[in-house]
Image (tube, helix red, strand yellow):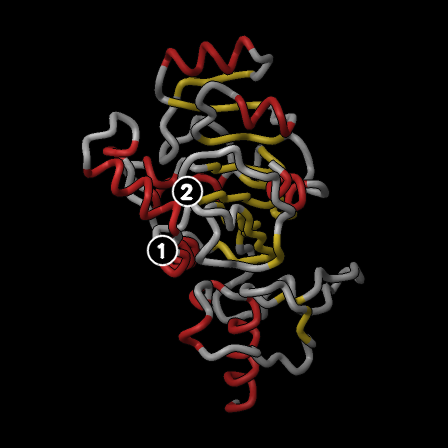
Amino acid sequence: MLCLRQLSGNLPRPWLEIGVGTGRFAEGLGIDVGIDPASAVVASAKRRGIRTVRALGHALPFQDGQFGAVFVIVTLCFADDAQGLLREAARVTQPEGGIVVGVVPAESPWGEFHAARGKRGHAFYSEAEFYTLAQLGDLARLAELWVDRVVSTLLQRPGRGPFDVERPRQGADGRAGFVATLFRPRRQPVGSPPASSWEHDDGEVPRPLLCAKDNTEIDPHNPRCPYPSSQCRFRACCPVREAMRYRRKESRR
């Protein structure tokens, strides 16, 4: 929950959660609306005070730009169409809003633990398809989403608890049992500089250009990725690499 609060504090209202389930996260975060295809869990979320709608994540019954923030919390691994879900999340998000995606990385001890439980026939995890952070980056790029910030937590290994509460760490850590990413919907034409990297024409102060791996701030006028491509799990949708590509394109003109 601390990870999600760190990323969502400044996002405009209203908020939507895709895959609201029983509403535990929605209640804790103060999310306004939740969708889920299962009638039983939607009823549970409604009793928690969440306005609920029965719907599928890849076919949201909402208008374009209706929400300031969309949350996808440990839901992507259960989606029939993960790419379609992220595209729909981007569609219903306001231009200045964000999509907060929380995942259990497939390469983490927790991802391997739950995947093994699924293979043994666990009723819940047998339906899950866990994604690596690199795969999440590819899905986000195809949905035209770009990384703003990433935080990680749950470095404790799975097994018998109790577990200590961990403070979120900045950046993407594939060893962590939970990684939360704030994505921004892309609104400018392909080939133009990322909105988080350059001055706006209207004089607004731009968001800083941050490395997707560890949230290090990068000079937007001379963008350089501090990591080799093989070490950047979000390289497919990293604003630093997009800014570098834009600079190279401009220099060839």
Total labels: the figure holds 2
Q: What residue would you read off at disc 2?
A: 158
Are there few (<14), some (14-19), or many (20+) residues within 10 Å of tag 1? some
In the image, residue 67 sits, relative to residue 210, either above or below, namely above
Q: In which quadrant will I find the N terminus?
A: top right
The amino acid pointed to by label 1 is Glu
Q: Is residue 51 left or right of residue 203?
A: left
- Whether the residues at callouts 1 and 2 have beta carbons within 8 Å, the answer is no
Q: Is residue 229 left or right of residue 214?
A: left
CA distance separating discs 1 and 2: 13 Å
Task: Please name whichever residue, 41 or 124, is drawn nearer the observer in this view of the structure.
Answer: 124
Relative image position of residue 164 (x, y in whole percent): 59, 39
Task: Please name whichever residue, 143 or 241, is drawn nearer the observer in this view of the structure.
Answer: 241
Relative image position of residue 108 (x, y in whole percent): 39, 53
Q: Residue at x 26, y 36 (%)?
A: 117
Relative image position of residue 237 (x, y in whole percent): 47, 63
Q: What residue would you read off at disc 1?
A: 107
Where on the picture, by quarter, is residue 81? top left
Task: Please name whichever residue, 87 or 82, is drawn nearer the observer in this view of the structure.
Answer: 82
Q: Residue at x 55, y 40 (%)?
A: 93
Residue reaching furthest to the left: 120
- Looking at the rendered structure, the secondary structure element under dot 1 is loop
Disc with the residue nearer the chain's start (1 vs 2): 1
Task: Please name whichever residue, 9 or 12, is drawn nearer the observer in this view of the structure.
Answer: 9
Q: Residue at x 36, y 28 (%)?
A: 56
Are there few (<14), some (14-19), or many (20+) residues within 10 Å of tag 2? some
Where on the picture, by quarter, is residue 195? bottom right
In the image, residue 5 sits, relative to residue 228, either above or below, namely above
In the image, residue 206 sits, relative to residue 10, either above or below, namely below
